[in-house]
Amino acid sequence: MHAICKKDSMLRRFSRRVKRFWAQLALLSVEMTIVLVLFVIALTAFVYITRRVFVLNKTKLDNAVFNYLKAHVSERNNDIMEFFTFLGTHQFLIPANLSLIAYFLFIKKHKWHSIKIPAIALSSLGLMFLLKGLFDRKRPSVPLLFEAKGLSFPSGHALMSVTFYGLLIYMIFKSVKNPALKWTLIGLLIILIIIIGSSRVYLRVHYATDVIAGYCIGFLWLVFTVWMLNKIEKHSKRKFDKVVEKPELKAA
């Protein structure tokens, strides 16, 4: 009787583990499906915008957005947009990246996060300059408050905001357990990314198509680099585990 009860208890535990495994697998599949769909949408949108701007020379969308925003220009909105545009500048993002690296390196002791942050930031910066030089689009001729240096397509603010704040979103999604807190933080960061990009169009230092293209490229690059760095991390851990296990095997 005791043996039967013990066997039944083992079967129940095994059944619970199997159900938990399939639930986690289903959740992972949903996450991967959503990311894949967004990846395809971002790639399609970037190709569409690039063709529209550089092949067909159509600027109807850009002009329509400028005309719409013209009615909302005010001193108060100028101050608000200048504040948010600052959150996408190198003056803010360089110290923010360094602070994040220090946090994961010395406080959280998460070596791979401290590697991922500069790897994504520096590669995103290089990609931005490469694409700007490749497309060579001039900025809007009449900025609202100040002239911005450099070329226009894609928007560096949009691209770098997606890769920096998007990486924060990824870390929050993976580490924060409280659902309410997790989705609140993610929602706020998404809104921040949208406002930073919008501020560039409001200030007339970028066209709307520059910003949309920056969002698309930023997302594509973030997904690719996170995937690649995760692969490298797993490979590195497997090699490290083998090194650690060797002395144990010899001792045995």
Image: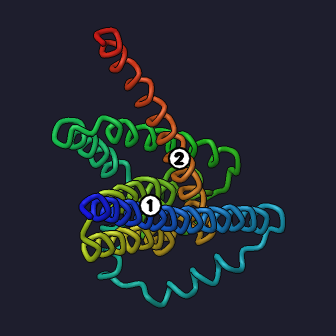
Viewer-proximal residue, 155 or 19? 19
Q: Is residue 103 above or below residue 67?
A: above
Q: Tell me: 213 left or right of 180.
A: right
Can you see residue 108? yes
Precedes in sequence: disc 2 or disc 1: 1
- Mark 1 Cα-neighbour bin, 10 Å: few <14, some 14–19, many ≥20: few
Viewer-proximal residue, 7 or 45? 7
Q: Tell me: 161 left or right of 7.
A: right
- Which of the 4 image quadrants contains residue 9? bottom left
Query: Which residue shows up at 36% across the image and 62% down it?
Result: 173
Q: Which of marks 2 and 1 is in front?
A: 1
Q: In this view, does 238 lie above or below 91?
A: above
Three-letter code, disc 2: Trp
- Mark 2 Cα-neighbour bin, 10 Å: few <14, some 14–19, many ≥20: few
Q: Which residue lies furthest to the top in this view?
A: 250
- Residue 80 image offset from top left, x and y in percent: 31, 75
Q: In this view, does 65 lie above or below 14?
A: below
Are discs 2 and 1 less than 8 Å apart at CB? no
Task: Name the residue carrying label 2.
Answer: 227
- Which of the 4 image quadrants contains residue 39? bottom right
Query: Which residue shows up at 52% across the image and 45% down it?
Result: 225
Query: Which residue shows up at 41% across the image and 70% down it?
Result: 190
- Residue 188 image offset from top left, x and y in percent: 33, 73
- Which of the 4 image quadrants contains residue 99? top left
Q: Considering the numbered disc 2 on the image, is that residue within a helix, a strand or a loop?
A: helix
From the image, which quarter does the C terminus lie in? top left
Indicate which disc residue 21 carries. Answer: 1
Query: Which residue shows up at 68% across the image and 61% down it?
Result: 43
